[in-house]
Amino acid sequence: MPLLVLLLFAATPFAQRPADIVKWSASAPAAAVAPGETVKISLNAKIERGWKLYALTQPEGGPQKLAIEVGVGAPFTVSQKQIAGPAPKTLADENFGMKTQYYEKAATFTVPVTVSSTAGAGKLQVPLEVTFQACGESLCLRPFTQKLDVGLSVGK
């Protein structure tokens, strides 16, 4: 009987976690930036095979569009309209009954982040918050916010 239970458990698919499906990493230039200046952070998504990461642009009524922000209260702002990324693919998506825009395999975004003019000098952490949704052929994961701290040197 214990062997049967073990076999049944081994055959059951494990719940998918968004952070396992889309793995995020980010980096800032090594050179120091002055308060009030803007720096371009590179944000990378590695997407598991068979999954789609929904794009920055998305029609209303569909999946959660990709959103890139900084944490509340941080001395940084993101220039939303200037975020650059690859051109998304478009598909008549059966999961939503509409055309959606998405990325597969990997996507890299350039995120312009402005340092507050009141930020102190030193090694600071930019608290990026990336909200995204991913779907496979038969399963959509709930929207999820991945938090990433990106080291940034701020000079005078």
Image (spheres, rainbow, N blue to C red):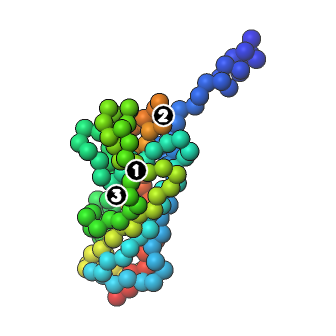
Pick whichever, 121 or 126, lies toward us. Answer: 126
Q: Residue at x 42, y 55 (%)?
A: 147
* Residue 141 in the figure: left or right of residue 119: right
Q: For mark 1, what is the residue?
A: 89
Report the amino acid beneath label 1: Lys
**The disc label shown at residue 136, or none:** none
Disc nearer the start of the sequence (1/3): 3
How many numbered marks have been drawn onto this rendered protein structure?
A: 3
Residue behind mark 3: 68
Where is 67 relative to 109, above or below? above
Amino acid carrying label 2: it is: Glu
Of 68 and 60, which appears nearest the observer?
Answer: 60
Regarding residue 16, the answer to whether it shows in the image is: yes
Dot 3: element: strand
Label 2 Cα neighbours within 10 Å, binned few <14 / some 14-19 / many ≥20: few
Q: Are marks 1 and 3 in contact (CB under 8 Å)?
A: no
User: Distance from label 1 to label 2 (Cα)?
Assistant: 16 Å
Q: What whole-number distance in Å separates the C-alpha atoms at marks 2 and 3?
A: 25 Å
Q: Residue at x 38, y 58 (%)?
A: 87
Q: Are marks 1 and 2 in contact (CB under 8 Å)?
A: no
**Percent position (x, y) of residue 24?**
49, 56
| Distance Cα–Cα, label 1 vs label 3 | 19 Å
Mark 3 is surrounded, within 10 Å at the Cα level, by few (under 14), some (14 to 19) or many (20 or more) other residues, namely many
Residue 74 locus on image (x, y percent): 31, 66
Residue at which label 2 appears: 137
Q: What is the quadrant of the N terminus in the image?
A: top right
**Which residue occupies 35% across, 65% down?**
84
Residue drawn at point x = 58 percent, y = 31 percent: 14
User: Relative to residue 94, is residue 71 depicted above or below?
Assistant: below
Residue ranking furthest to the bottom: 156
